[in-house]
Amino acid sequence: MATKQGNDRLAVLIDADQGQHGVLQELMSEISRYGTGTIKRAYGDWTEQNMSKWKGLLQANAIQPVQQFRYTKGKNATDSALIIDAMDVLHSGVVDGFCLVSSDSDFTRLATRIREAGLAVYGFGERKTPAPFVAACDKFIYLEILKPEVEVQKVSAQIDGKETTAVDEVDESAIAELPELEPLVLSALEKTARDDGWCSLAALGGQISRDHPSFDSRNYGFSRLGDLVRTQGYLQTKEVASGENGQHIHLHVRRKPAQ
């Protein structure tokens, strides 16, 4: 039986061929919100020149690099190695959940298999991650929201003998569209509201996450769900005190009554 979220033992398996080394520190900090990474491995062909940037970051976060050669050009053997190790860990019974770090849809079946065994699956990938993999996870976090600020890659170029920089163009077609917020919130509110229309923020957030594993208030520019709902004109909020002397304050939400 899984332990309380936050104390879970987690297997963190990173597809380094698909991963972003530049956000690794923020990724590990995010994972700590859900549990403790007792198994931490990154898979890739570490003989490749472009993988050298991972070395210091892996050491700083005590992540074990797992070498996987590319046996055939154009084929990624890393996926298979990660999946085999994941199944070994699953059957060992030493963890309560998995963190799968990849934007590759090939891990969709792995995520569903882990969940069938009763363990939690947290996915981490870029906004280009295919919807089936996102939906297969209990919770999916886009790596873009973990960056401290929007990073712009610059490319050096030689123009008239002088070095200059040009900003890389972003392939907007590769960025997944976020679901429209209002119908998403109202649908969850309808499922969780009491007879008087009110529900707690915790209940609302839990239902939204079950309906949409990729939901995160940071996708919409707010660090906290409470701050997000307070800005929505179709919602009404109130603070409810509980406990002795009312020391605990809980936010409650309902749909704003029609005028």
Image: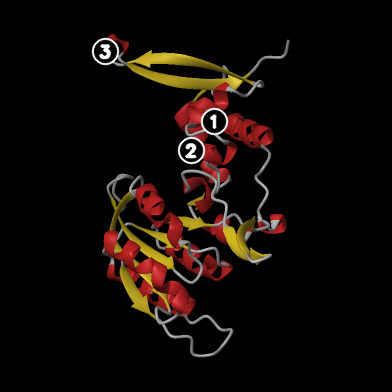
Determine which residue is flagged by label 1. 192
For badge 1, the amino acid type reads Thr
Can you tell which quarter of the image residue 169 is in? bottom right
Dot 3 or dot 2, earlier in sequence: 2
For badge 2, the amino acid type reads Gly
Position above or below: 169 against 183: below
- Residue lying at the far bottom in this picture: please name it: 72
For badge 3, the amino acid type reads Glu
For the point 62% across and 62% down, the residue is 162
Could you tell me which secondary element the residue under label 3 belongs to?
helix
Q: Tags 2 and 1 in contact by the CB under 8 Å rule? A: yes
Determine which residue is flagged by label 3. 244
Of badges 2 and 1, nearer the viewer stands 2
Could you tell me which secondary element the residue under label 2 belongs to?
helix
Q: Tags 3 and 2 in contact by the CB under 8 Å rule? A: no
Of badges 3 and 1, nearer the viewer stands 3
Separation of residues labelled 3 and 2 (CA atoms): 26 Å
Any mark on residue 206, and which? 2
Residues packed near mark 2 inside 10 Å, few (<14), some (14 to 19) or many (20 plus) = some
For the point 58% across and 46% down, the residue is 212
Residue 93: x %, y % from top left? 28, 65
Dot 2 or dot 1, earlier in sequence: 1
